Image: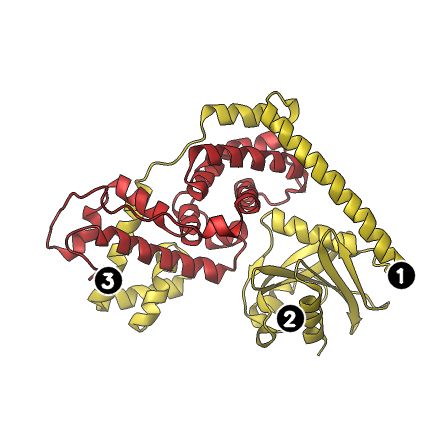
Amino acid sequence: MTCDDAASALDPYVDGELAPDEAATFLQHIDTCPACRQTLEQRRALRRAIRRVPYRQAPERLRTAVATAPRRRRSIQPLLAWAAMLLLGVSLGAAGVVLARRTAGVGASDVLAEAVVDAHVRALMADHLLDVPSSDQHTVKPWFVGKIDFAPPVPDLSSDGFALVGGRLDYVAGRPAAALVYRRRQHTIDLFIWPDAAGGAAEAATVRGFNVRRWWRDGMAYRAVSDLGSAELDAFVRALQR
Amino acid sequence: MPSHSFEASVLPHLDAAYNYARWLTRNDADAEDLVQDASIRAWRFVATLRSEDARAWFLTIVRNTWYDRFGRATAAATVAFDETRDDRSDGSPDPEARVMQREDTDRVQQAIAALPVDFREVIVLREFEDLSYKEIAAVVGIPIGTVMSRLARGRDRLQDLLEADGPAGGRV
């Protein structure tokens, strides 16, 4: 291990994120390199210093407000917040109706678009985007073996500007699906894949502000969901279909 | 799938939410508002919680609420590190011990607050909440590799800030 390697292993080591063999290699280097040993000592000292900073505890009035406010609406502020939420809900609902009508108008009929957007939002909200975080297609693909009864293709699209960040097992309308997660700038793209020999017409839809694309290939159904703009999501789909 | 109640999922993590909010906003009143708003969202969405880790889930909501409210512009702003506030000097020549000597918590606290929020929040989630890289990635909405590099750069900056504060100047 070189000092450069040790420098990039330093923080994962301190944070307990290295695999045992990586940690052993790192420690071997530390044993023989005084400069890196000192850097490690500085990191440890910094951690002790940071952890001595007092933890900010929630004030009692906040605790009381949160415990009682959302449902009993005793204070003005949560009431206002609720009113705002309600208003937002109504306007989103209205927007949804308009969108639904518009997509219906052009013959869109992806009955699963709603379901994949739900799955996408749920994953983002519920801290469950990735079961297997990895940018390596050869790590992500084998991970699905034994979890689902099909082998989803896991293409590397980094040269097209879409970085693979991992995958997870998800469910779309009650059936298991492989969800591959790609990233473009700050945007997350979920690619849902499941076996479906029936096939159908490729289609674009917009659900609650998320763009959805569907297509079939080699006996698999595909849905791509993202808050990415239409043109860029189309580029993603084209890269996949190449 | 277990069902989650607001009482069991959100209330136990109020301190974590407040601590994170306080470090995001650097202000007591804003932090309280933020946690209240986030709690309302959490109450609304608690039925969608399917992960066992309610704390990371709630912290994600705090983070999203903060982001929606304050936006990128505010998020990117930083407060200058007040180097004049504490002019105590401890001119120990021992470089090994340099960081150790500056463990005054006030100063450390100030230095963390002076970091750009991108670095500040990953350090807070890692050191105060003990979240794994994977959990931090989910809360902040960035890849795990970015968590790692932000932690490394944030800590480098912190060390620089803390060491520059002393008479011995730069790093070894």
A192 sits to left or right of A67: right
Mark 2 lies on residue = A154
Q: Nearer the viewer, mark 1 or mark 3?
A: 1
Image x and y of residue B99, in percent: 22, 51
Q: Determine if residue A220 is in view.
A: no
Report the number of discs: 3
Say which element carries label 1: loop
Chain B colour is red
| Distance of label 1 from label 2 (alpha carbons) | 31 Å
Say which element carries label 3: helix
Of marks 1 and 2, which one's residue comes earlier in the chain?
Answer: 1
Q: Which residue is found at the position 70% from the left and 52% from the top?
A: A119
Of marks 1 and 3, which one's residue comes earlier in the chain?
Answer: 3
Q: Which chain is yellow?
A: A
Mark 1 lies on residue = A107
Mark 3 lies on residue = A37
Q: Is residue A95 above or below residue B154?
A: above
Q: Are marks 1 and 2 in contact (CB under 8 Å)?
A: no
Q: Is residue A226 above or below residue B128?
A: below
> Which residue type does callout 1 highlight?
Gly
| Distance of label 1 from label 3 (alpha carbons) | 66 Å
> Which residue type does callout 2 highlight?
Val
Q: Are marks 2 and 3 on the same chain?
A: yes
The chain carrying label 2 is A
The chain carrying label 1 is A
Q: Are marks 1 and 3 in contact (CB under 8 Å)?
A: no
> Which residue type does callout 3 highlight?
Arg
Say which element carries label 2: loop
